[in-house]
């Protein structure tokens, strides 16, 4: 924080971050299948990581991508899949993290996406 001074928007330490968060940030998720899709968009990188961690811990979902906001003005987004109920629960939990600090832009659950959506995500 001292190095960035007034340029630091947010920072955090997450103890015991879920391993899927790291895999999704590195775009190393191995997923083949279909299900509902959940997307959460945040105003900061830190909020996206918090949201992704809360989402994957809330229900049985697979994080497909945690896209960190380099070149997006700091905006970041999280994409997950699973059965509809699990995706809804995860999006609610992850979105709550962003709502609490005013950094949630938007979230959506798509219950029955077309298969082409998965192709474009992977």
Image: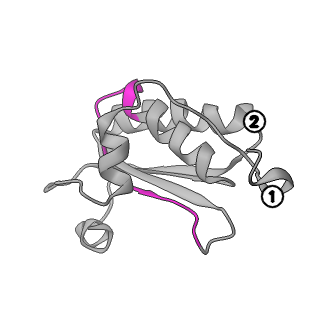
Seen at 57% across and 58% down, the residue is 76
| 120 part of magenta stretch | no
Element type where label 2 sits in the image: loop
Is residue 64 at least partly visible in the picture? no
**In this view, 111 is above or below 17:** below
The boundaries of the magenta stretch are: 56-70
Percent of width and height locating residue 96: 62, 31
The residues tagged by marks 1 and 2 sit, at their Cα atoms, a distance apart of 18 Å
Residue 1, quarter of the rendered image: top right
Left or right of 87 in this view: 119: left
- Farthest-out residue, right: 6
**In this view, 20 is above or below 105:** above
Percent of width and height locating residue 40: 54, 50
Q: Kindly identify which numbered label has been placed on residue 120.
A: none
**In this view, 16 is above or below 71:** above
Q: Residues within 10 Å of mark 1 (few under 14, many from 20)?
A: few
Left or right of 81 in this view: 106: right
Q: Identify the residue position indicated by label 1 in the image.
A: 7
**In this view, 100 is above or below 106:** above
Q: Identify the residue position indicated by label 2 in the image.
A: 101
Q: Residues within 10 Å of mark 2 (few under 14, many from 20)?
A: few
**Front-most of 64 and 90?**
64
Seen at 39% across and 54% down, the residue is 25
């Amino acid at each position: 924080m001292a190095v960035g001074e007034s340029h630091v928007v947010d920072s955090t330490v997450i103890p015991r971050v879920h391993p899927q968060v790291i895999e999704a940030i590195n775009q190393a998720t191995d997923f083949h299948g279909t299900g509902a899709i959940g997307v959460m968009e945040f105003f900061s990188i830190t909020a996206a990581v918090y949201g992704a961690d809360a989402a994957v811990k809330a229900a049985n979902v697979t994080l497909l991508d945690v896209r960190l906001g380099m070149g997006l003005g700091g905006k970041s987004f999280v994409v997950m899949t699973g059965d509809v109920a699990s995706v809804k629960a995860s999006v609610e939990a992850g979105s709550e993290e962003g709502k609490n600090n005013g950094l949630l832009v938007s979230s959506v659950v798509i219950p029955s996406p077309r298969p082409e959506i998965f192709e474009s995500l992977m």
